[in-house]
Image (cartoon, rainbow, N blue to C red):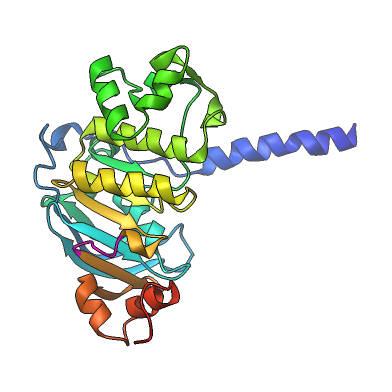
Amino acid sequence: MASELETNIISVERINDYIANEVEAPSIVEDNRPPEDWPHNGSIRFDNYSVRYRHGLDLVLKDLSFDVNGSEKIGIVGRTGAGKSSVTLALFRIIESCCGKISIDGKDISQIGLKDLRSKISIIPQDPVLFSGSIRFNIDPFNKHSDEAIWQVLEISHLKSFVSSLADGLHSEVVEGGDNLSVGQRQLVCLARALLRKSKILVLDEATAAVDMETDSYIQQTIRNEFSGCTVMTIAHRLNTIIDYDRILVLDKGHIAEFDSPHNLLKDEKTIFYGMVKDAGLVTSE
């Protein structure tokens, strides 16, 4: 009985942890809601932005200041622990700033509700998130779009032939976590979801790190064609996927080490980016 009590008391500890957690910011701030078409341009500005994961820990991003123009394609690179994924978490306000701010189209994102913010930004994460339900539900969970629109994005994301081959088509069941789909197919479902939302800002958090080269090629080709008018921020695992982007943001220990076009960064062999590209075998010593 003592052993069973010791085991069960862990449940009480977990509940206590939830009670002690800080409550997330409100989903909607009624007196400060962005316009329906926000963001119209998709420009992003980090202004002396610093953040830590919780009180008492070291800063993971330190005094970041940079601008991303609307429709610009930005690659984010850096060694492990440089703070790449923290930029994504900050943009969605998964973690809140210690100082400084992030603005989208001139609007301070800390002043608006989380639902208004997160519903306007699409993300294709490294670990694709799928739910127990139909393929249709996973692409359009709020049932806002027609079947025709869903078939259209499935065709663009190279999934139409696969879904058509299933007995129930769009209504075929996906088990929890998408375990009855391959990793590549799960990632393409997330891509179709992003296509359907037509967000002005798209974030890719090492989205192609776990997929084969063919699926990687599909995703990159679709992003170039279908998101040409959108702002894209890509945390890169394979450097060849961002080598033709407008600019590359190189992070080092939470600071901005370099921020320039790939062409300019590769002209200087002393840059961190040049070293990373060389290590990846994309340039020779000559």
Residue 18 is left or right of residue 240, and the answer is right
- Residue 31 falls in image quadrant: top left
> Could you say which is closer to the camera, residue 255 or residue 208?
208
- Residue 250 falls in image quadrant: bottom left
- Residue 266 falls in image quadrant: bottom left
| Location of residue 286 with respect to 247 vertically, above or below | below
> Could you say which is closer to the camera, residue 31 or residue 225?
225
Q: Residue at x 20, y 71 (%)?
A: 261
| Location of residue 171 with respect to 55 vertically, above or below | above
Residue 17 is left or right of residue 227, and the answer is right
Taking the magenta stretch, the answer to whether it contains residue 73 is: no
Q: Which residues are magenta?
A: 242-246
Residue 46 in the image: x percent, y percent?
A: 22, 61
Residue 91 in the image: x percent, y percent?
A: 29, 51
Residue 161 in the image: x percent, y percent?
A: 38, 25
| Location of residue 223 with respect to 4 vertically, above or below | below
Q: Specify whether residue 111 is in view.
A: no
Picture quarter with the N terminus: top right
Picture quarter with the C terminus: bottom left
How many marks on residues?
A: 0
Q: Residue at x 16, y 47 (%)?
A: 228
